Image: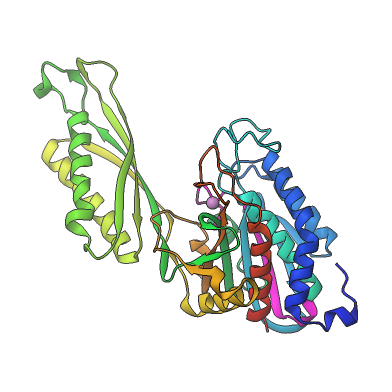
Amino acid sequence: MSLSPGHAANDPDRIIREETARLAPELVAMRRDLHRHPELAFQETRTAGKVAEALARLGIPVQTGIGRTGVVGLIEGGRPGPTLAIRADMDALPILEKTGLAYASANEGVMHACGHDIHTVTLLGAAEILKGLAPRLAGRIKLIFQPAEEVLTGAPAMIADGVMDNPKVDLALGFHNWPLTPVGAVGFARGAVMASSDAFDVVFKGRSGHAAHPHKAIDAVVGAATFITQAQTVVSREISPLMPAVVSVGMIQGGTVRNILPDTVTIKGTVRTLAAEAREQAEATIRRLLEGLKAGMRLDYELTYTRLVPPMVNDDAVLDRVLASARAIVGADKVMELDGPSMGSEDFACFAELVPSAHIRIGSGAPGRRDMLHNSDFQPDEGAIPVGVQTLVRSALDMLR
Ligand code: NI
């Protein structure tokens, strides 16, 4: 983009709107290309290549291989100031696409069913406009194209590779398309908006034996069943009823036939909370229950407890600035508060844990459809792209004024 001096003197909102309208067709075309070629977590090499190429074409310095397949671009403003990170995720899901769209996935069994293809091009569009407006910025913008959000390990991988340093990030902005909010609108919630996510795997180790002589064996099946039942008390008896939490076991595996008690039973579960205190309490209780089971039922066990991401907490001050920008560019009536937090998780929380941050939703609900994320027929409205671009650009301009 090249802006004539006369043009650059114009009202920035006019520039944002005109440039977004000009870029929209190519952003939609690129989104459809990404949609056709979805890539799973940490395999986003084609996507990362396209992103790096687009940034380089804009004259934006690019770093690749940050967090394995992540890409980082940097836009230097005309004056000194803070560094604002804006993050988009790039990965797809192991789902067989059933949309029947002309640009449906050509990578069978892999689908952009969460709309990260939309996120990627939204940030590229914002980057192009912000590059043109860079002389107006007091500070710089770090463009973070993140891999592996769906497995919640892409953000930690990029942080481990130093994405928050050199230059040090001061503020961060994240976004997700949201089919429950109509296209054209921007959604938000305050405080803890998404849950922490931790994983526990337990191998219950008994001693195999004949099912007819259980006293000669140590029954891992009854042990696992007892633990799963006891784990229901983590939320109901251990964590304050005023603090939302979920403990779910989604996998149980053990045994081969009716008349043999197996040596081991394995379970896999997840813990979601909206507060650090509840998160600590859940882990401590699970550990205590397992110790109790060991003493009480003679079972041994092996626990792998993995802390994935903290709760996603919006910083009020940063969120308020973003909302003011969104209201100014898309209309006050289009910025809507969501019903409340979600017990789903988002690894943008790892950035938000380090610097004041805001995470917003860009409405992608198409008229007449009732789409949900992670569905094989997910068809977000591409009108979310220009709304996202305008919101990101205006927010960045306002935050780096
Ligand atoms: Ni997603």
Q: Going by the image, does 376 lie left or right of 197?
A: right
Q: Position of residue 131 (x, y in %)?
A: 78, 70
Q: Is residue 245 above or below residue 29?
A: below
Residue 139 in magenta?
yes
Task: Give the residue displayed 28% in from the left and 22% down from the top.
Answer: 255
Q: Position of residue 90 (x, y in %)?
A: 63, 50
Q: Is residue 13 above or below residue 306?
A: below
Which residue occupies the extreme front position in the image?
368
Task: Give the residue displayed 74% in from the left and 70% down from the top.
Answer: 17
> Start and end of the magenta stretch?
134-155
Considering depth in this image, is 284 or 377 the residue closer to the camera? 377
Quadrant (top left, top right, bottom left, bottom right) of the N terminus: bottom right
Task: Give the residue displayed 78% in from the left and 75% down from the top.
Answer: 133
Residue 162 can be seen in this image:
no
Q: Position of residue 231 (x, y in %)?
A: 22, 46
Q: What's the image's color scheme?
A: rainbow
Q: Is residue 362 above or below residue 317?
A: above
Considering depth in this image, is 366 or 353 the residue closer to the camera? 366
Q: Position of residue 211 (x, y in %)?
A: 15, 18
How many numbered circles are shown? 0
Residue 89 can be seen in this image:
yes
Q: Going by the image, does 8 lie left or right of 203?
A: right
Q: Is residue 387 above or below residue 168?
A: above
Where residue 299 sits, quadrant-wise, is: top left
Residue 113 in magenta?
no
Considering depth in this image, is 184 or 368 the residue closer to the camera? 368
